[in-house]
Image: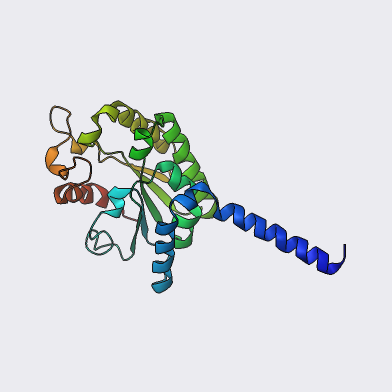
């Protein structure tokens, strides 16, 4: 094969690989959200070394997260996309985490996996995969997992939520560079039921009071 043919073959290989990467199911499913994140980064390049919040609608809907929730943190970045799963976060580490080079990643995801049929063991596997990918590229970045909240509209999945939380917490406790943030317990009343005032009328998404509780619990885990 002559030089021109070699270059053409190489170009074809690179194109094929790039297409395979861009056509991954997670990237196709969340293309609009990922494109919006990339556009925001282009307008305001992210400062490395900050705190990055990643996850589903509980992160996406956290008003003031980047500005007023944690004023003692110089850089807070929010990359939440509603309806996402822990499996999606693991699939998209290269888009959601690596470009920001944070000192700390706070991850909230898992509820949607369980409601779509995933097992607690599946969630642990997704979390481990997420951690491994971050650790390979950013070995000095800490990772904190926000426990799955006890949503009143999802009481049928409460046992699975508790099991998934326990599995992930047990894994986290065995690693010095991981953290587990328990918001689940403080969101229950004395009878072990979800506190309704912490949720909006849909009994799924957090109210302002719910986010206030999260801020109190999370803030202690953000110190360098």
Q: Residue at x 28, y 48 (%)?
A: 58
- Residue 104 rendering spot, x and y as whole percentages: 39, 54
Can see residue 154? yes
Q: Residue at x 51, y 47 (%)?
A: 25
Can see residue 102? no
Q: Is residue 176 left or right of residue 218?
A: right
- Residue 115 rendering spot, x and y as whole percentages: 34, 34
Q: Nearer the viewer, residue 163 or 174?
A: 163
The answer to which image quadrant residue 10 occupies is bottom right
- 24 relative to 170, above or below: below
Q: Quadrant of the image for the C terminus?
A: bottom left
Q: Nearer the viewer, residue 144 or 12?
A: 12
Q: Quadrant of the image for the N terminus?
A: bottom right
- Residue 7 rendering spot, x and y as whole percentages: 78, 66
Q: Residue at x 41, y 44 (%)?
A: 178
- Outermost residue on the bottom side: it is 43
- 94 relative to 119, above or below: below
Q: Residue at x 82, y 65 (%)?
A: 5
- 162 relative to 142, above or below: above
Q: Is residue 2 left or right of residue 219?
A: right
Q: Across the whole image, how many numbered discs are drawn on residues?
A: 0
- Residue 89 rendering spot, x and y as whole percentages: 43, 47
How is the structure coloured here? rainbow
The answer to which image quadrant residue 14 occupies is bottom right
Q: Is residue 10 left or right of residue 180?
A: right
């Amino acid at each position: 094969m002559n030089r021109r043919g070699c270059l053409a073959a190489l170009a074809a290989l690179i194109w094929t690989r790039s297409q395979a990467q861009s056509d991954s199911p997670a990237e196709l499913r969340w293309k609009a959200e990922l494109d919006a994140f990339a556009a925001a980064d282009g307008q305001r390049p992210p400062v490395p070394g900050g705190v990055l919040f990643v996850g589903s609608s509980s992160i996406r809907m956290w008003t003031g997260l980047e500005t007023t929730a944690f004023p003692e943190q110089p850089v807070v970045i929010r990359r939440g996309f509603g309806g996402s799963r822990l499996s999606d976060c693991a699939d998209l580490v290269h888009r959601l985490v690596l470009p920001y080079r944070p000192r700390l990643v706070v991850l909230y995801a898992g509820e949607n996996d369980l409601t779509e049929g995933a097992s607690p063991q599946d969630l642990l596997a997704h979390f481990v995969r997420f951690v491994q990918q971050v650790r390979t590229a950013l070995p000095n970045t800490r990772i904190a997992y926000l426990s799955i909240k006890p949503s009143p509209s999802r009481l049928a999945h409460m046992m699975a939520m508790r099991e998934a939380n326990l599995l992930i917490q047990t894994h986290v406790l065995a690693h010095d560079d991981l953290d587990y943030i328990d918001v689940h317990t403080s969101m229950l009343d004395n009878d072990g039921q979800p506190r309704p005032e912490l949720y909006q009328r849909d009994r799924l998404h957090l109210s302002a009071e719910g986010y206030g509780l999260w801020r109190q619990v999370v803030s202690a885990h953000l110190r360098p």
